[in-house]
Amino acid sequence: MTEASLTWNRLPTRVLVLRIVDMLKSFAIPIVILFVLNNDWETTFGIILRVAVLLFIGFDLLQKFFGWRNFRYALDEKTMYVIEGNWMKQEKSLPLYKIQSVHSNSPFFYRLLGVVELTFDTNANSDDASFKLAGVFPGEAKRLEDVLDQSRRRRLEASTEPSESEDGVTEKTSTIEKPPGVRLYTLSTREILIASLTSLSVFAIFPVASTIITYIDDFINLDGTFDQIGDWVISASVIAIGVLILSILLLSVVIGTVINFLKYGNFVLERRGDRIRVEKGLLNRSAKEIPYEKIQAIRIKETFIRRWFNIIGVELVAAGTMDELKDESSTILPFVKRDKAMAVLNEHFSQFAWADTLHRLPKRSLVIKLMRISWFGVIVTGIVIYFFREYAWWLLLLWALIVGGRVLSYYTNRYARNGTFIQLRTGAFNVRSFVTDKPRIEQIHVTQSWLQRRFGLCNVVLSTRGGLLSIESIEDIPKREADAMLDWFSRYNVENMKTPG
């Protein structure tokens, strides 16, 4: 690395402010407890504890300062160079061709100070698969993205240069050009509102309130307050209690709606050349790009309530991305009407074909599902009967849910092979559909228990190159169908089909 020939850049000074604020946030509770609520400087233990906390905070501040001061980065036409380290400097270099995508994130404090966090994803399966520039100005972020775009265009032009064949005829590699900057979908205010009303976040206020009350009770005794509330509930009329419950639910709906608006406000799904880009958020603005060639499968999710309203969520399974760590990072349509979502998928993700009809499980699959022992139900039943016998009638509801879930699973689970594509639909109360094609499948695994052998059934597990979240399975399909899937996959000819990604 020749430092003299490169233009080195540092992170803005306000990034150091952000790091100090984050550090103080992590120490906020110990500081309040030790220096505000219980400021004990009289006992030896109290003095030692507080001095140790202050020394640790001071050491962390020095570490943050030297980490910011030592960090530098530079780019040339082919490589990005980074120097980092708190006490000892480390030098790294990364070829630009390895950077598959750039994701930007702008939390509220970042936007308040006018900086953006950039994450460069190399799609490698290692600890160095990605690295961050935790705070650059928007203009600098745009410049870095332009440099990477130019590098990608140069590689594309190099791969499409004319080549001469054996008979002297000049040939040119044909490529499919995708229109850049095409807006595929934007969420409307009405869709966010309907999604808030059809989610279980309506009931989120109860565990949140319980957590807050427990936390407050650690410092302030609320027993007297609870006694007064209990006396009011006993003496209040049914109408008053009903109004109270409706008010709490309404407040929960309002809170859930506000959270969804902050999370999905200004949601935009775009197609930029050879990649998909998702932008979302009001206070915390984030943007993520997924290369087309890295898409291994499409997954559609349907929650129990939203199925009544024909609302689905769509996410992509991408090879080697950070999606393995963040379940929602690959979501491209969080809650959209099925017909609108399928229109987007059929038009802009035509590399995946959805089957018109799916095969249902045989009736013996329902028999074996009902025969399986539910150890959760058995354990709960034993505990209730032994310790809480007066509430044993609640077990009827428990077993109704268990049996009902298995019956729903039988009617919901389906599968199909459509040419080179395979499609699975699994779940009971919450359902998800999965589609991929043969070149993107890494493995198909068939298992069979002793009980399944008696009924001629199998479980099929398939995985793509999308990491842990790319594993899909379907239970209790006929053995001949499982063997047909294995035979279908084993006949895949590498010479005739190019594996994407």
Image (tube, helix red, strand yellow):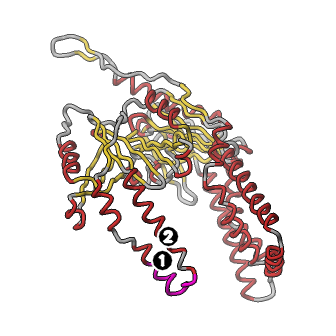
Q: Which mark is residue 389?
A: none
Q: Which residue is mark 2?
A: 398
Left or right of 244? Residue 53 is: left
Q: Which residue is mark 1?
A: 380
In reply to whether residue 105 is colored magenta, the answer given is no
Q: Residue at x 53, y 86 (%)?
A: 387
Please give the range of residues in magenta: 379-390
Q: Residue 46, how many percent across, how many down?
A: 74, 84
Q: Is residue 250 above or below residue 208?
A: above
Q: Residue at x 72, y 87 (%)?
A: 45
Left or right of 292? Residue 215 is: right
Q: Is residue 90 above or below residue 238?
A: above
Position of the N terminus by quadrant: top left
What type is the residue that disc 2 sits on?
Leu
What type is the residue that disc 1 sits on?
Val
Q: Is residue 392 above or below residue 350?
A: below
What is the secondary structure assignment of the residue under circle 2?
helix
* Neighbourhood count class around disc 1 (C-alpha, 10 Å): few under 14, some 14–19, many 20 upward: few
Magenta stretch: helix, strand or loop mostly: helix
Position of the C terminus by quadrant: top left
Depth check, front residue: 129 or 202: 202
Q: Residue 55, how many percent across, how many down?
A: 69, 72
What is the secondary structure assignment of the residue under circle 1?
helix
Tag 1 near tag 2, CB within 8 Å: yes
